[in-house]
Amino acid sequence: MKGLILSGGKGTRLRPLTYTSAKQLVPIANKPILFYGIEALAAAGINDIGIVVGDTKSEIHKAVGDGSQWDISVTFIEQDAPRGLAHAVLISESFLGDQPFVMYLGDNLLASGIKPLVEEFSTKRPAAQILLTQVPDPQRFGVAELDGDTVVRLVEKPENPKSDLALVGVYLFGPEIFESVKRIKPSLRNELEITDAIQDLIDHSKVVRPHIVEGWWKDTGKLEDMLEANRLILETLSRQINGDVGPECEIEGKVVVEPGAVIRHSVIRGPAIIGANTRIEHAYIGPFTSIMSNVEIRGSELEHSIVLEGSSLTDLSNRVADSLIGRNVRIYRQPVKPSAYRFMLGDNSEVGIQW
């Protein structure tokens, strides 16, 4: 069995961060989201993986390399534009051949991994097996309707859903899927939809089986989901202090301090992770915070946030919370109240100012 990870797309919901970085490489608990998917496939015994890439192909190629760090083989498959999940399957046919495969969306996280799913698929060998999870708002998702242990219908974002079982971003397919992706037509948004391809399998009397997800699942396409995924992953960490922590500091709970980090006159309340060569002085770092390498935080408070490499927070009078701060960002307190504000803000920015 082979693996196919989709790492194209433009990450519009995470702009402006994704103007300069691939959304799949934004870190959760100081590890790129994409790496969790690779690890899930490797843990399921899949060691030949294709990664579909788009505009950020060079960045993803640099981060992943040849796959040797996971003891796998990686093939990069270029998609010229986001043309739908089924299109990604279509352009990967020469790599996948006639083998069954797992398709994994590169910005998704699963608590339980996929090994049980792979084993179930290998035993029953349907044409397709799809992951489903119960959601309170099925109108926002592709929804599956079941008859016992068989999927009989898929509906994309139904107005009146007959089920609360939404599709999760992991699919298993046999080679039958290639005929279906060649038969379907582009949707109204001019994409080849994987839900249409799976429905085509059903319409041609092929067996599509469901697998209900145990544990949590997150699509990290939005800030809120990314912070929630960060929280969930941090809760699984074990305390590990490898940096230089002054005796006057308070370190509480599940806290990871990576080598080279220096902490002085500060309080760190876990779960939290402090990256290599980061310096924290006279600061408070609250729960559910991930700080990458070479960050500097002085005289400031931070919680429930993600801070990427090379950034700094200095002498802030109010606590920073529920935030995703990109690479090489400087946030600091001005000594006087400004007479005017000057901004250059990306799409979907939000600024609140109170004096």
Image: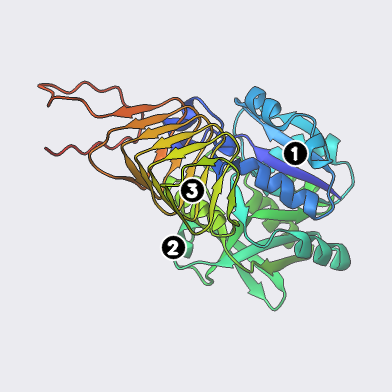
Q: Amino acid at mark 2?
A: Glu
Q: What is the tally of numbered marks visible in this picture?
A: 3
Q: Which mark is residue 44?
A: none
Quick check: 287 above or below 57? Answer: below
216 displayed left or right of 74 = left
How much space separates mark 3 and mark 1, taking CA atoms?
29 Å
- The residue carrying pointer 3 sits among few (fewer than 14), some (14 to 19) or many (20 or more) residues within 10 Å by Cα, namely many
Q: Earlier in the sequence, mark 2 or mark 3?
A: 2
Q: Earlier in the sequence, mark 3 or mark 1?
A: 1
Residue drawn at x 77%, y 65% as measured from the top left = 116
Q: Earlier in the sequence, mark 2 or mark 1?
A: 1
Q: Quadrant of residue 329?
A: top left
Please give the residue where the numbered disc 3 appears in the rendered image: 226
Q: Which quadrant is home to the C terminus?
A: top left
How much space separates mark 2 and mark 3, taking CA atoms?
27 Å
Q: Residue furthest right?
A: 98
Q: Which mark is residue 159?
A: 2
Q: Amino acid at mark 3?
A: Met
Residue 266 picture location, percent across and down: 38, 44
**Element type at marker 2?**
loop
Q: Amino acid at mark 1?
A: Leu
Please give the residue where the numbered disc 1 appears in the rendered image: 90
- The residue carrying pointer 1 sits among few (fewer than 14), some (14 to 19) or many (20 or more) residues within 10 Å by Cα, namely some
Quick check: 113 above or below 275? Answer: below
200 displayed left or right of 252 = right
Residue drawn at x 42%, y 37% as measured from the top left = 280
Q: Nearer the viewer, mark 3 or mark 1?
A: 3
**Element type at marker 1?**
helix
Residue 331 picture location, percent across and down: 32, 29
- The residue carrying pointer 2 sits among few (fewer than 14), some (14 to 19) or many (20 or more) residues within 10 Å by Cα, namely few
